Image: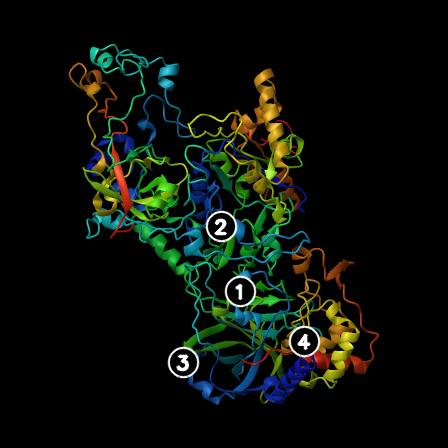
């Protein structure tokens, strides 16, 4: 376990599946040099096969005895989808195949292949919701455990899980070991790569690209041990933010507010069935564990309280009026860490979100 | 040619050139002069209607305000003096039992950004239509199959997405695809009658005389289609 | 059980029959310069080739479900390779030939393609040269240098040259026209190289690539007639090794069709390369070539009596244990000296890491005063004969030769 842990909370009630986070991450980190197929951040429709295809069934993680479980390394064509390209060139040049714009291969799979498909029957009880996923920067990472080369490490200062590319030799056991399949093999450099929680941004006072760009303002970022941080309040104080598939035993540090607000079902005549909800709670329990019932209860209670009294700290938190209400970063802390490790302390590029517990008021000049 | 001309004539597109657009994958970034109804800031999101809310500029409507009531006699005759939901005017036919819906796309403003490789990779990469899972399976269509969508007017091809969210009597295809992005260069408008909305003819023509944002209005949901698994072609 | 034992013993006998050649190769001194030697260089006609057997190294259970399920990996076979060695005044050269029915070149557009490859391990400079490093990438105070060549499509790795600028997407460079073409050319020049690497290590997990150019390496692989020829030449002396007289080396090959990589490979034990015309290192030669004098049948009984399989998987019927390395095929790649040391001083070589993370409840060592102390019982109380017998038994545990 690291000394401190950065965490992210995603409010699934607010995710609209716009993929802005995906594109923010893609254009920042993964649109080049063998990473084209990787989505360090993806948003999948649940229920669905997800990305990579059926990732929940590909093994990895730990059993109750704490033993790493074998897993499967997904295939580019079948499970991730080959990132197709287009004939822009011939379209521009007026060449023979320029009469249509088409991908260079027949698309058979991609990162958002089953978008909006969901489950149930229209219009009685069809439902789906969006599940944005990044690396969980686990406290007990499956990828780290699986690596026979000590090429994966968890940063002491903030618990970010990183690949040391100098050590990595492309064995891919990490991919089998990660139950979320959020570490990827870069075939061009024959090394594994993964979400870095935008640590170069965080150190300088900027939230991760996926979180800052999120139009639904669903993502909260901060340190779990900072009692004033949004993530601490959501995870530990109100206990409404839960890890995804915690049963994999890796202790994920990305937490989700379960989707509590789903419309009622319709009966055969198209009339609303009062008190019903389309989203089966069993599905939520599968994803977020039995704690989901208490989380839903708390959310509903606080929502009611807010409606009746106008006051609820939890609802205010979740509304996220300002970007600065969502991120509690700590540039001063990182400067301290840098000094201790004889590295060059970095000046903040943005001071709006620097409010963490090691940052003195007005101290970030 | 048209893009070339636009690049040359529109100061909002400066300093982009055709070559640069092509290199980045077929798009350009508009500059600060490109916004309407609000300034376009370089460092924060665009929020529309700042000009109207803060500078009290009038809207480009007959009244200068948002208009929810038009008392022109044609509007009254058509029962449309105020916003009113109506049945679609598509033919009720057993041969073409599915209503063809083309909602706004998730990321594109009409065809703008439609050729972005980054965004296309986040869907199916080709025009895809959501069809009701149960109906499609009964027709022997699997997810990812190419389907032929047709009616008496014409036909086009799309990839089938078997969905729980699509109505049994409908077919949902995001709009904004250009004909050249479809198989055989046949766009989705091949099957849409595009009947002119009679309200357009009030007071002559032009939605009460060609206001600033005039855009010839048609009827919504006037396309009735059928679909089947495509025989010889595949995306 | 008796039948199985007989099989194992007969395998042991078969292997020891080939011992003389399996454990020693004579390197011929040549006048030709070897620093740029290739597989088709005429100088190889002077080399004396010997057969070396490479055994599957399966000490720990890896977590790739598909690879583990391959029949070739469930029952791995040992592999015969031909090895010849030459040396000039400054360089040593090895040529390794092995049969491989499939040419597996790792694709740079696939996540599930694996390469054929080979590696040569040299013992590094150490205070006690006759005590060899642990075969699995050395051990503390006993370093190894490993030259690795993989069959791979070109590798793009500008960061390997500490070049961050060329990791930027060409679309985001702000370059255009001629300048952009120059950028592309620079990326291609930086990033399309052969997968040849040199590592230094003091134990499994510690292997670190030498990237500062302080080791010269000239390795290549060519495929023809259902087999690979791998060649390597390197200086006899540099900052990491000082090769003279009797040179211990170990050879490994990987098979991409078996999803080969770390944990799925064939490895020779330490073998001696005698530099002809130089004074052999007698102690080293003895360490490399002496076989156990014990009785494997009695050794098997002693192993059972001392409860070895309580923690180690020895027979296939024993459960896979996360507490300790599997000894199923340990005789193939381990030296007598190493096996004896491991029984008498279990903490002499303790592989770090793996269990602390992957099987936290079955740690195979504890850290005491900053040192790894094996959780294995110290068998120093056993008499010499029993130890010899157990070593002889362990040496007999080898995979069948392909």
Q: CA distance from mark 3 to mark 2?
A: 41 Å
- Mark with earlier residue (3, 1): 1
Question: What secondary structure is found at the residue carrying circle 4?
Answer: loop
| Subunit bearing disc 4 | C
What residue is at 51 percent from the left and 36 percent from the top? Answer: A211
User: Pointer 4: what residue?
Assistant: C132
User: Pointer 2: what residue?
Assistant: A54
CA neighbours of label 2 inside 10 A, class few (<14), some (14 to 19), many (20+): few
Is residue A326 found left or right of A81 in the rendered image? right
**Residue found farthest to the left:** B204
Q: CA distance from mark 4 to mark 3?
A: 36 Å
Q: Nearer the viewer, residue C112 or B235?
A: B235
Between disc 3 and disc 2, the foreground one is 2
Instruction: Tell me, yes or no, whether the two marked residues, 4 and 3, touch with CB atoms within 8 Å.
Output: no
Q: CA distance from mark 3 to mark 1?
A: 26 Å
Is residue A166 found left or right of B131 in the rendered image? right
Question: What secondary structure is found at the residue carrying circle 1?
Answer: helix
Q: CA distance from mark 4 to mark 2?
A: 47 Å
Q: Are marks 4 and 2 on the same chain?
A: no
Mark number, residue A224: none
């Amino acid at each position: 376990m690291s000394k401190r842990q950065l965490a992210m909370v995603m409010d699934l009630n607010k995710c609209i599946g716009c993929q802005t986070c995906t594109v923010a991450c893609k254009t920042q980190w993964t649109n080049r040099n063998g990473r084209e197929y990787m989505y360090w951040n993806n948003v999948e429709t649940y229920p669905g096969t997800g990305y990579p295809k059926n990732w929940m069934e590909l093994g990895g993680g730990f059993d109750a005895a704490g033993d790493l479980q074998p897993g499967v390394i997904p295939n580019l064509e079948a499970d991730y989808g080959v990132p197709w390209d287009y004939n822009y060139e011939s379209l521009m040049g007026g060449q023979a195949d320029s009469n249509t714009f088409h991908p260079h291969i027949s698309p058979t799979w991609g990162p958002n292949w089953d978008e909006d498909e969901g489950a149930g029957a229209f219009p009685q009880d069809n439902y789906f919701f969006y599940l944005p996923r990044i690396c969980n920067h686990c406290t007990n990472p499956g990828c780290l455990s699986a690596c026979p080369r000590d090429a994966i490490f968890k940063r002491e200062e903030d618990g970010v899980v990183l690949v040391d590319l100098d050590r990595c030799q492309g064995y891919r056991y990490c991919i089998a070991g990660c139950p979320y399949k959020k570490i990827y093999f870069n075939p061009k450099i024959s090394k594994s790569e993964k979400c870095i929680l935008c640590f170069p941004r965080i150190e300088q006072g900027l939230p991760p690209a996926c979180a800052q760009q999120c139009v639904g303002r669903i993502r909260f970022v901060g340190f779990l041990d900072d009692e004033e941080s949004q993530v601490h309040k959501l995870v530990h104080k109100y206990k409404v933010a839960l890890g995804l598939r915690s049963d994999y035993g890796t202790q994920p540090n990305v937490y989700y507010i379960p989707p509590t607000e789903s419309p009622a079902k319709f009966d055969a005549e198209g009339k609303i069935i009062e008190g019903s909800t389309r989203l089966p709670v069993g599905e939520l329990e599968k994803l977020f564990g039995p704690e989901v019932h208490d989380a839903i209860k708390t959310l509903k209670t606080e929502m009611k309280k807010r409606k009746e009294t106008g006051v609820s700290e939890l609802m205010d938190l979740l509304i996220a009026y300002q970007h600065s209400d969502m991120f509690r970063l700590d540039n001063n802390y990182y400067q301290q860490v840098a000094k201790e490790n004889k590295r060059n302390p970095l000046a903040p590029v943005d001071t709006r979100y620097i409010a963490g517990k090691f940052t003195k008021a007005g101290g970030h000049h | 040619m048209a893009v070339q001309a636009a690049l040359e004539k529109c100061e909002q597109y400066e300093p982009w050139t055709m070559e640069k657009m092509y290199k980045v994958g077929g798009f350009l970034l508009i500059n600060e002069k490109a916004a309407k109804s609000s300034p376009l800031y370089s460092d924060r999101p665009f929020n529309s209607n700042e000009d109207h809310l803060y500078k009290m500029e009038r809207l480009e409507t007959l009244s200068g305000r948002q208009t929810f009531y038009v008392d022109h006699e044609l509007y009254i005759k058509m029962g449309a003096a105020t916003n009113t939901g109506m049945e679609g005017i598509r033919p009720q036919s057993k041969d073409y039992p599915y209503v063809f819906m083309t909602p706004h796309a998730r990321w594109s403003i009409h065809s703008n950004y439609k050729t972005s490789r980054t965004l296309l990779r986040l869907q199916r990469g080709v025009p895809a239509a959501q069809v009701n899972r149960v109906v499609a399976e009964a027709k022997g269509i699997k997810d990812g199959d190419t389907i032929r969508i047709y009616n008496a007017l014409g036909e086009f091809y799309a990839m089938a997405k078997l969905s729980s969210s699509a109505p049994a009597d409908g077919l949902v295809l995001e709009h904004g695809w250009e004909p050249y992005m479809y198989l055989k260069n046949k766009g989705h408008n091949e099957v849409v009658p595009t009947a002119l909305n009679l309200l357009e003819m009030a007071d002559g023509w032009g939605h009460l005389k060609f206001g600033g944002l005039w855009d010839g209005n048609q009827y919504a949901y006037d396309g009735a289609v059928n679909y089947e698994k495509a025989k010889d072609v595949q995306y | 059980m008796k039948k199985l034992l007989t099989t194992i013993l007969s395998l042991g006998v078969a292997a020891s029959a080939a011992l003389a050649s399996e454990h020693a190769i004579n390197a011929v001194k040549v006048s030709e310069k070897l620093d740029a030697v290739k597989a088709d260089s005429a100088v190889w006609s002077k080399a004396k080739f010997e057969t070396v057997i490479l055994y599957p190294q399966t000490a720990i259970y890896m977590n790739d479900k598909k690879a583990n399920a391959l029949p070739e990996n469930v029952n791995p076979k040992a592999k015969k390779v031909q090895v010849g060695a030459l040396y000039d005044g400054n360089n040593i050269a090895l040529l390794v030939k092995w049969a491989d029915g499939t040419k597996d070149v790792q694709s740079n557009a696939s996540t599930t393609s694996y390469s054929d490859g080979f590696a040569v391990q040299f013992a590094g400079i150490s205070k006690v040269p006759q005590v060899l490093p642990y075969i699995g990438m050395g051990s503390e105070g006993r370093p190894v240098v490993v030259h690795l060549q993989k069959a791979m499509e070109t590798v793009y790795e500008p960061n390997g040259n500490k070049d961050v600028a060329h990791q930027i997407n060409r679309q985001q460079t702000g370059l255009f026209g001629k300048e952009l073409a120059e950028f592309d050319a620079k990326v291609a020049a930086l990033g399309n190289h052969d997968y040849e690497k040199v590592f230094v290590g003091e134990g499994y997990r510690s292997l670190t690539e030498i990237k500062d150019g302080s080791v010269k390496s000239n390795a290549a692989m060519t495929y023809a007639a259902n087999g690979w020829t791998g060649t390597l030449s390197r200086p006899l002396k540099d900052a990491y090794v000082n090769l003279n007289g009797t040179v211990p080396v170990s050879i490994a090959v990987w098979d991409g069709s078996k999803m080969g990589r770390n944990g799925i490979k064939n490895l020779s034990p330490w073998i001696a390369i005698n530099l002809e015309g130089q004074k052999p290192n007698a102690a080293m030669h003895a360490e490399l070539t002496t076989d156990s004098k014990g009785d494997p049948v009695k050794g098997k009984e002693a192993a059972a009596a001392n409860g070895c399989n309580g923690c180690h998987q020895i027979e296939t019927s024993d459960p896979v244990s996360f507490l300790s390395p599997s000894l199923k095929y340990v005789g193939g790649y381990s030296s007598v000296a190493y096996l004896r040391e491991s029984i008498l001083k279990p903490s002499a070589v303790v592989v770090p890491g793996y269990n602390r993370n992957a099987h936290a409840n079955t740690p195979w060592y504890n850290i005491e005063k900053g040192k790894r102390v094996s959780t294995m019982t110290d068998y120093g109380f056993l008499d010499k004969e029993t130890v010899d017998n157990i070593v002889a038994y362990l040496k007999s545990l080898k995979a069948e030769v392909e």
